Every structure is written in structure tokens, then in C-alpha cells.
Amino acid sequence: MIRSRAFAWVALAFVTALAAMLTLVASNYMLRLATVVAMYAVLAQSWNFIGGLAGYPSFATAAFFGLGAYVSAVLQSKGVPMLAAWLAGGAGTALFAAFLSGAILHLRGHYFAIASLVVVEVLREIINTTPDLTGGGMGLNLPVLRLSVTAQAQLFYLAMLMLFAAAFATALVVHNSKAGFALRCIKQNEDAASIIGVNAYAYKALAFTLSAVFVGVAGAIYASWTNYIDPTDVFDLLLSVKPLVMVLLGGVGTLLGPAVGAIILLVFEELIWRNFLTIHAAVLGAVIVVLVLFLPNGLMPMLQGFWRARWGPRMEPAA
């Protein structure tokens, strides 16, 4: 077990360093795609804390993403340095999630899902009705970096990559800790977990906060990357649906599943967008439905089963 954990940490460092080298050879277009993949992976890995481990179907990802984007954008418009604004976006989103957990985590199943979805609409309306601070429906412009197009592409790719590495490292720690065991118990049977001494609310609140903090920073980085945000963009409900789909494609509750699902989703988006421009949304939806039906547990559990059957040791050491 110790050896497998050490291997996971070494693999994370190696893959991150290898991915960072993409800035030396990739075009701006490829860096844009890689940045989107890293952002998707952050969203999916974050959702996996509350949805994959705890079994709570959260649709609040868009709320956290938009909140982080606006906290960072407002601060930068007031003269706060970009990096400090990114960190503030993550911290503000985490505090909001911790506060929100007391209001909705007593709900379960579809009641929790609906409550988390409502949060997105509430925050969007708040932004729309505070134009003096947030720009309202007209959106908000961010300061433009004095860097070349290539340098900006490299900067935001590396920022999103480092954020994913941090999210994955956190997931690695949680999966192999008492918190991970408690969350899996809650997913199986929350009442039974409480009976054996698991503080269900505390661990659910931890998972919900973890599902927010990295998403908030991702929203902050995205705001700087695009130089302009508006409520319909950063509070888009697709930002709540896509992480769930990515985790389902990759494998619910696994370590590598969210990243694998992010790559699969982006590949399908790019291929279908190019070949089915007018009906791409319908075609993409149909493809995702078929994949979920034929791979109900995601790709990683299937590959792990194949690996065990052929070679014995499991493929994902620390999951």
C-alpha cells in the first residue's frame, strides 16, 4: 500500500512535468485545447469529492465557478494583483460552500440536487441586479496582461495545469485517508455510517467545500484568460452538467476517472463540433447517453478489471 501511494505521487509529479513541457512545442491552438482539458479535469475532480465519494449529486459547480470568477474579476478591477485575486476567488468560494453546506446538506437525493441547482440561479440573479459592482448583465472587463498572445497561452495553460495537479493531489490524500473511508461509508449507507460513529455532516461539509475551492480558482483563472465575463457565461448550467458527465465517463469515485472523462468529453466536443455544426449539441448528447449506457461504471473500472484479469495488480494504485 505504501509503495503504491509513493508510485502515485511520483507518477503525478512526472506527468505534470511532462504536461508542462507542452508549452515548448505546442501551438497556441493546442495550448487552448490543453487549457480547456485541464479546466474540465479540475471541475470533474472537484465534483468527484461530493458526487463520487459521498454520493451527493451536486449541481452547484456552475455557482462556484461563477462566484470565483466574479470575486477575482471585481478585485482585479479594483487594482488587486492577478494571483492574489485568484487565491481570493478560491477562498471566497470555499467560505461560501462551507456556509451553504449548513443549509442544504441535510437534504438527500434529488432534493439536494434541486437545491444545489437553485444556488446557480440565485447567484446569477444577484450578479444581474448589482451592476454598480459587477457590471450586471453587461458583464465585466478585466485588465489586459501586457504579454504576447503566445506568452498568455502558456501562462494560463500552466496555471490551469498546476491547479489540476493540486486538485489531484488533494484527491489522492482524501482517497487514502480517514475522510475518504468515511465518505465512502456515507455513500453506501449514511444512517449506518452515523451509527458506527462517522460524523456525517462534518465529512459531507468537507467534501462540499473541496468541491468548491478548486472550481472557484478555475473560474478566477478563466476570467483572466478571457478578459471578460458575464453572468450567462460563467453561471452556465452546462458547467454543472459537464463535470457529472465527465466523471460518469471516466469512473465515479476513482482517482483517474475525472481526468480521463475530461479528455474524452473534449475530444467528442471537438470532433462533433467540426462535423455536425448545426446539430452538434444533439449529437454530443446522444453519444454521451450511449457511452453511459454501455459503460455504466465508466472507463477506468473497466480497464482496471481488464488489468486484474490479465496481470493481477490493479491499474490505479491509490484509488
Image (spheres, rainbow, N blue to C red):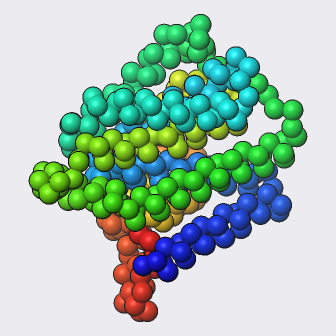
**156 above or below 169?**
above
Quadrant in the rendering for residue 75? top right
Q: Quadrant of the N terminus?
A: bottom left
- Nearest to the observer: residue 299 or residue 23: 23
Tell me how many marks there are.
0
Residue 223 screen position, x and y as percent:
64, 32
Residue drawn at point x = 21 percent, y = 44 percent? 109
Residue 28 screen position, x and y as percent:
79, 50
**29 above or below 256?**
above
Is any atom of residue 141 visible in this view?
Answer: no
Residue drawn at point x = 63 percent, y = 34 percent? 86
State left or right for residue 273 relative to residue 117. right
Residue 163 screen position, x and y as percent:
61, 49
Residue drawn at point x = 59 percent, y = 57 percent? 165
Is any atom of residue 233 visible in this view?
Answer: yes
Residue 276 screen position, x and y as percent:
56, 51
**64 above or below 241?**
above
